[in-house]
Image: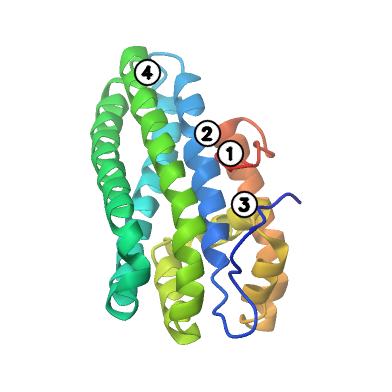
Amino acid sequence: MEHQTTEGPRLHGPGLTDVRMMQVAHSSFRRELGLSPVAVRAVAGGDHRRTSIVAAHATLFLSLLHHHSVEDDLLWDVLLARVPGELAPLVHVMQSQHEQVAVLLEQAHEALGTWRRTASASDGEALAGILSSMCAALFEHLHAEETHLLPIMARHITAEEWEEFTARGMSSIPKRLMFLGFGMMLYEGDPEVIGIEMGKLPAPLRRLLPLLGRRSFRRYARRVHGTPTPPRGIGAVA
């Protein structure tokens, strides 16, 4: 299984809060949103059924991205209160990136609504262009977050605060998509990190989740991307 590794500042270990689960979530965002422009462009003009499938996929991940951004702001506010000096060099860059992604996110939602209604090739191309621009901005932001912000979080956010943060993130995923969401993380996420999270679950769920999660993701990926094994490492920085 391929997964991202982190070099440089540590994100876990003695005296640190393990914040690597953020990277696992990011890998799913990168892959599923990064593959969306290709999926949109592959839909033939006038194919309303296929348009509905791909539009639902893009809508899901744009919605999850919105929740992710709101939750990020919660941790950002805590850190600003605790270590403003460490964050000072990042404030302008992170705020600028957030604003850019937010503008493109709004444009993407609007373009998605239009494409859903018309299923036209031209509207699909317009949407794909916006999604491509949004992915470029988002991937730059996620890389900055992982490189500069996560190490600060590891030092200054408590384990209890991190648990609450990750629980809120998981609660933003609709219950009906629990197995799918877990399968998406299993597909590319760091096995060690996922194993730690799995250890917190009741034994029956620990046995069921990997099997049902992988099965659910394979089915979903085949439906949306045309293959049960879509490319890994989308948007990752070498």
Residues under labels 4 and 1: Cα distance? Answer: 20 Å
Residue 70 versus residue 174: which sits nearer the camera?
Answer: 70
Residue 87 versus residue 47: which sits nearer the camera?
Answer: 87
Please state the horizontal and vertical placement of residue 226, each as a whole percent of the image: 62, 30
Q: Could you tell me which secondary element the residue under label 4 belongs to?
A: helix
Q: Are marks 1 and 2 in contact (CB under 8 Å)?
A: yes
Query: Which mark sits nearer the N-terminus, 4 or 2?
Result: 2
**Which residue is identified by label 3?**
216
**Which residue is identified by label 4?**
125
Please state the horizontal and vertical placement of residue 178, each as a whole percent of the image: 52, 62
Q: Could you tell me which secondary element the residue under label 3 belongs to?
A: helix
Say few, some or many: other residues with alpha carbon within 10 Å of mark 2 (under 14 / 14 to 19 / 20 or more): many
**Which residue is identified by label 2?**
35
Residue located at (63% from left, 44% from top): 219
Residue located at (58% from left, 32% from top): 225
Q: Could you tell me which secondary element the residue under label 2 belongs to?
A: loop
Residues under labels 3 and 1: Cα distance? Answer: 21 Å
Q: Are marks 4 and 2 in contact (CB under 8 Å)?
A: no
Residues under labels 1 and 2: Cα distance? Answer: 8 Å
Q: Can residue 110 be seen?
A: yes
